[in-house]
Image (tube, grey):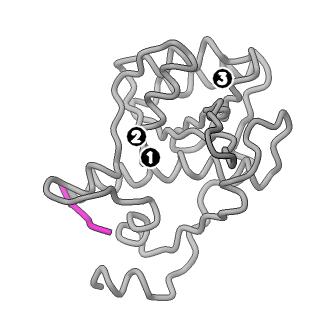
Amino acid sequence: MSRASLRTAELPVYHGIALADVRLVDSEALADEAFDTLMNAGEIGFDTESKPTFLKGETSTGPHLVQLASESRVYLFQISRQHGSKALKTILESPLVLKVGFGLGNDRSALQSRLDIEINKLLDMGEVLRGPGHRGTVGAKVAVAHFFAQKFQKSKKTSTSNWAAPNLSERQILYAANDAHVALRIYRAWVKTGSVELTE
């Protein structure tokens, strides 16, 4: 199937990870579980969410949420919570764990500023799949269509919701979890198929 037809075909929906496999790190016990799971994973999916800014000149206070995914579980860390902050920093700074995601340029700088850390071993699949000589980056939707022949649905309403809220909705939790989880799945599919480059 050509890239053009992949964009327009009625592909089956990509369902992603289930809500039952997502953990909001709101206790030290869950922080310990997340640390053990993610530090032993070798490579993990990574993404962040920030409360959007709508006013001209308004400065973002994000990221407000960090999502880290193993193959079978996703952990969500709310920056405003004390629970899990030490585990989160250690994982992000670890040179032993590869963090893979899409569009990570802003995530790296914003998190380093917010948490005062140096993130190590970060791989932006959007740049890797684009390859040299191409402008822009490849998004998760195009990658999911290419590798899985499925449609990765992303709600604009959810993406621009309040990620700084102390209580996230199930819709927000699933949206955030799948952003990190799908990056890991795409990375593993990319490794299996060898070095392949895509264009939007």
Q: Main secondary structure of the magenta part?
A: loop
- Furthest residue toward right: 167
Task: State yes or no: discs 2 and 3 in contact (Cβ < 8 Å).
Answer: no
Q: What span is in magenta? A: 195-200
Specify whether residue 199 is painted magenta. Answer: yes
Q: Position of residue 164 (x, y in %)?
A: 75, 36
Query: What kind of element bears circle 3?
Result: helix
User: Spatial distance from mark 3 to mark 1, Cα to Cα?
Assistant: 19 Å
Q: Which residue is mark 3?
A: 33
Q: Which residue is mark 1?
A: 184
Along the line of sight, the residue nearer the viewer: 5 or 200: 200
Query: What kind of element bears circle 2?
Result: strand
Q: Answer with mark 2 or mark 1, whichever residue precedes in sequence.
A: 2
Q: Residue at x 61, y 32 (%)?
A: 63
Residue 100's disc is 2
Q: Quadrant of the C terminus?
A: bottom left
Query: What kind of element bears circle 1?
Result: helix
Tell me which amino acid carries mark 2: Val
Tell me which amino acid carries mark 3: Glu
Along the line of sight, the residue nearer the viewer: 8 or 164: 164
How many numbered discs sit on the rendered protein? 3
Q: Residue at x 67, y 32 (%)?
A: 64
Residues packed near mark 1 inside 10 Å, few (<14), some (14 to 19) or many (20 plus) = many
Residues packed near mark 3 inside 10 Å, few (<14), some (14 to 19) or many (20 plus) = some
Tell me which amino acid carries mark 1: Leu
Q: Position of residue 44 (x, y in %)?
A: 46, 36
Task: State yes or no: discs 2 and 1 in contact (Cβ < 8 Å).
Answer: yes
191 left or right of 133? right
2 left or right of 46? left
